[in-house]
Image: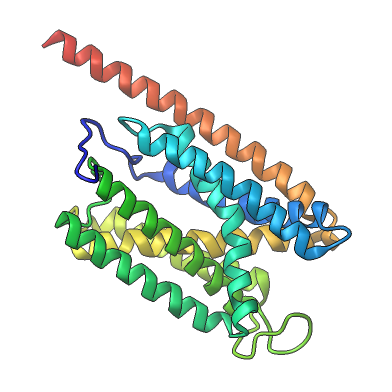
Amino acid sequence: MLDKKFQWNKVPAIGLLFWLTKLISTGQGESLSDFSSKLFGQQNQMLGAVFTVAWSLILFGIFLFLQLKSEKYRPVFYWLSVALLAVFGTILADGLSGVLGISHLFTSLIFAAGMGISFMIWYHLTGTLSIHKIRTLKSELCYWLTVMFSFAMGTALGDWMADTRTGYNPDPYGLGLGLLNTGLILGLIFVIVLAYRYFGRPAQNSLVEILSFWAAYILTRPVGASLADYFGYTWNGGKHGNGGMSVIWLVLFVFLIAVILVDFHKKSANYFTQKSEK
């Protein structure tokens, strides 16, 4: 079953639209996760968190199953899986630090180790770490396992940089940079990595090309989440809140998905037109 092969690619092309959608999905996941937890946890905070994890995890499982079952990359299934992972991943990554009672610095290292293990499994099973052509079920499963670890690592990394060592919910090793500074610093690094990928043009599937992709992928999480929290809670006196930011992110996300769908169907139509003319 794991050796099942697909004629078509199962992941999106990597370009500006990909990175914009990824950033928006992480911001949306952060705001929506907080909004849902608060909405359903008015009487019991833990109950709100559990309910949020439950509904988002179930929906994530459904859309990921549909994407895995499909014979090719389906934009709606893929991006809804990514967006829902951002929702429940926020709570689970934060919860691990709370349950273990350790700094986000150490959970970042734990998730980094998990990501490294997923790379080794991926390479052992497929002989490649290509993120451009995913055409077997086992490579697709390895891809999504790595995506999950990248989300968790990015969440923990952002929290470690933003959290203070004193006050509400302190982190004993937190850098105390705050939400905005964390978002701006990691955002700058993210832009530098993308600039290198665009202007440096590393050879496709080379080690540096693969690592730069995953570095950028990890960074989208803390950048989007930090800015979502800043504009929801701090900017303009927190007037927008996580509810208002959830709506803003959702509108942007739906717009980008619409653009992706138009582009996807246009390219598909052109492909079949060219093929029929041969």
- Residue at the outermost top position: 277
- Quarter-wise, where is residue 254 in the image? top right
Compared with 167, 200 (above or below) is: above
What residue is at 85 percent from the left and 55 percent from the top? 239
- Number of numbered discs overlaid on the protein picture: 0
What residue is at 64 percent from the left and 55 percent from the top? 53
Q: Position of residue 143 (x, y in %)?
A: 33, 53
Q: Is residue 232 visible?
A: no
Q: Position of residue 209 (x, y in %)?
A: 25, 60
What residue is at 60 percent from the left and 61 percent from the top? 90
Compared with 145, 13 (above or below) is: above
Q: Nearer the viewer, residue 270 or 62?
A: 62
Q: Relative to 277, is 29 on the left or the right?
A: right
Q: Position of residue 212 (x, y in %)?
A: 32, 63
What residue is at 24 percent from the left and 12 percent from the top? 273
Compared with 73, 107 (above or below) is: below
Picture quarter with the N terminus: top left
Q: Relative to 32, is 149 on the left or the right?
A: left
Q: Is residue 176 visible?
A: yes
Q: Relative to 188, is 129 on the left or the right?
A: left
Q: Nearer the viewer, residue 209 or 46?
A: 46
Picture quarter with the C terminus: top left
Coloring scheme of the render?
Answer: rainbow
- Residue at the outermost left position: 278
- Quarter-wise, where is residue 170 in the image? bottom right
Q: Position of residue 72 (x, y in %)?
A: 31, 31
- Residue at the outermost front position: 1
- Quarter-wise, where is residue 178 in the image? bottom right
